[in-house]
Image: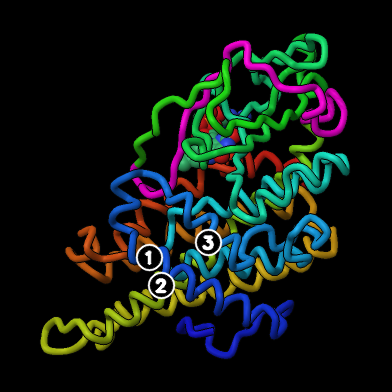
């Protein structure tokens, strides 16, 4: 790896195919998407065309079985792609949700017919995927969701709303958490796959939520008012939604961890390069002991984080990543990202606070990592349960 402090480090799961994938991904993000970064930030959502192009290059659904058009790989391939995206500084495409989360739900709980209907479109980028759990009244207490789905003939009639939904402006396919039994908490939750292309009757996209970071990625409110979803779009059985989410959340947390470590690596690279060239008091910043100490500390934190992340990735590919360890990864790696990026920004002085320098954007983008995918306070609750 080229990151200072990680020279010569090779992920224990890495094979030559990951190098080829990384190169393809790097080229796509840097040559085809990044040149549009300023415009994408302005419009507040990615270009649909970039999803299609990613699909064309075989970069979507890397872990989806080949029979549904996917790459036939595993989580190491998804991790490689997401790592390159963050390392390149590309933040518009919601691939972490699209491929890292949504395809997992369909693959693991979809019937054969459902998989054949939806997975090829997600893999080609014709369909953009999203997941809707959080509601305006609360996100941490998932069991308390209020969006209702009432069975009516061959349909469910859905009423309610979701908020903070990543990819919400562009989403064609939404895995939606609903209450099919309002008298129950966890056991009343089911997952419905909603087809949203063309904004069907009873469905409305709300405003694009303005955020302090991740400006090029769309986050939206979604409203359902007697919105009809075919009963055939139920994932698995009624009442199994909470268990399905609990089973998928460790991967979601690992996806966040992959982004966190990639951001740490990028911050260290940028800070070391700047410290070598910026002169203060007649010598480069790196010539001042405090700068060297700070960089030594963040490089160490990054390397230790990398090793823990890779251990989690290996456990996950073996099907052995437990809830508490995934929560530890999300907690430790995102806290590390925020600390490392903040300390690296300090090395840039005033320039670190200007949007001309990528480190400033990384600082704003980092903050949400401690919030979504389950807040870090909830991670501590999950960890404490196994102590
Ligand atoms: C940019 C962005 C993208 C997102 N993408 C998605 C998405 O694609 N899909 C989706 O469904 N959601 C998404 N979310 C929502 C996110 O998962 C929630 O914001 C998060 O789970 C917290 O829920 P909340 O905002 O309702 O906070 P609350 O649940 O109201 O929590 C507020 C505070 O109280 C703390 N707290 C709550 N309960 C406890 C407790 N028991 N013990 C201690 N502290 C507690 C929390 O840690 C937090 O600090 C996204 C959010 C953002 C900002």
Q: How far apart are marks 1 and 2 (CA)?
A: 6 Å
Indicate the secondary structure of the residue bearing disc 2.
Answer: helix
Does the residue at mark 1 contact the one at mark 2 (Cβ under 8 Å)? yes
Asked if 306 appears above or below 224 in the picture, the reply is: below
Q: From this viewpoint, is residue 386 visible?
A: no
Find residue 256 and report its image quarter: bottom right
In the picture of the structure, the residue carrying the numbered disc 1 is 34
Mark nearer the N terminus (1 vs 3): 1
Q: How many labels does the image show?
A: 3
Q: What stretch is highlighted in magenta?
A: 212-241
Residue 228 among magenta residues: yes
Crowding at mark 3 (Cα within 10 Å: few <14, some 14-19, many 20+):
some
Name the residue nearer the viewer: 273 or 181.
181
Q: In this view, does 148 lie to the left or right of 267?
A: right
Which quarter of the picture shows residue 276?
bottom left
Q: Does the residue labelled 1 lie within 8 Å of ligand 1?
A: no
What's the distance in space between the residues labelled 1 and 3, CA to CA? 14 Å
Badge 1: residue crowd in 10 Å (few <14, some 14–19, many ≥20): some
* Residue at point 17%, 89% (across, down): 283
Name the spot of residue 81 as percent of width and height, x first: 59, 67
State the image coordinates of residue 208 (x, y, percent, origin top left): 39, 33
Q: Viewer-nearest of labels 1 and 3?
A: 3
Q: Residue at x 49, y 70 (%)?
A: 28
Image location (x, y in percent) of residue 235: 80, 33
């Amino acid at each position: 790896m080229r990151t200072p402090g990680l020279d010569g480090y090779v992920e224990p799961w890495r094979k030559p195919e990951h190098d080829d994938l990384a190169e393809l991904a790097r080229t796509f993000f840097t040559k085809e998407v990044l040149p549009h970064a300023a415009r994408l930030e302005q419009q507040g959502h990615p270009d649909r065309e970039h999803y299609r192009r990613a699909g064309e290059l075989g970069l979507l659904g890397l872990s989806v079985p080949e029979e549904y058009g996917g790459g036939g790989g595993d989580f190491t391939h998804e991790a490689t792609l997401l790592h390159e995206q963050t390392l390149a500084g590309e933040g518009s495409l919601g691939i972490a949700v699209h491929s890292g989360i949504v395809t997992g739900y369909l693959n693991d709980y979809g019937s054969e017919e459902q998989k054949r209907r939806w997975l090829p479109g997600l893999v080609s980028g014709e369909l953009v995927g999203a997941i809707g759990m959080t509601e305006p009244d609360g996100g941490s207490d998932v069991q308390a969701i209020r969006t209702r789905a009432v069975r009516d003939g061959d349909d469910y009639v859905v009423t309610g709303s979701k908020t903070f939904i990543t990819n919400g402006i562009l989403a064609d396919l939404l895995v939606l958490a609903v209450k099919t039994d309002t008298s129950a908490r966890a056991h009343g939750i089911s997952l419905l796959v909603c087809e949203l292309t063309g904004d069907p009757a009873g469905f409305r996209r709300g405003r694009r939520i303005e955020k302090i970071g991740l400006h090029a990625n769309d986050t939206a409110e979604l409203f359902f008012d007697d919105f009809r979803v075919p009963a055939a779009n139920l994932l698995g059985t009624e009442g199994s939604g909470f268990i399905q989410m609990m089973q998928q959340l460790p991967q979601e947390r690992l996806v966040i961890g992959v982004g966190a470590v990639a951001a740490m690596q990028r911050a260290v690279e940028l800070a070391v390069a700047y410290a070598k060239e910026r002169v203060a008091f007649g010598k480069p910043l790196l010539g001042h002991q405090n700068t060297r100490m700070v960089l030594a500390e963040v490089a160490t934190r990054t390397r230790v984080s990398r090793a823990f992340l890779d251990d989690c990735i290996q456990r996950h590919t073996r099907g052995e990543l437990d809830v508490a360890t995934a929560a530890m990864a999300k907690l430790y790696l995102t806290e590390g990202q925020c600390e490392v990026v903040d300390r690296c920004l300090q090395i840039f002085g005033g320039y670190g606070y200007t949007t001309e320098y990528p480190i400033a954007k990384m600082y704003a983008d980092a903050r949400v990592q401690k919030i979504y995918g389950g807040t870090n306070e909830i991670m501590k609750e999950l960890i404490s349960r196994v102590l």
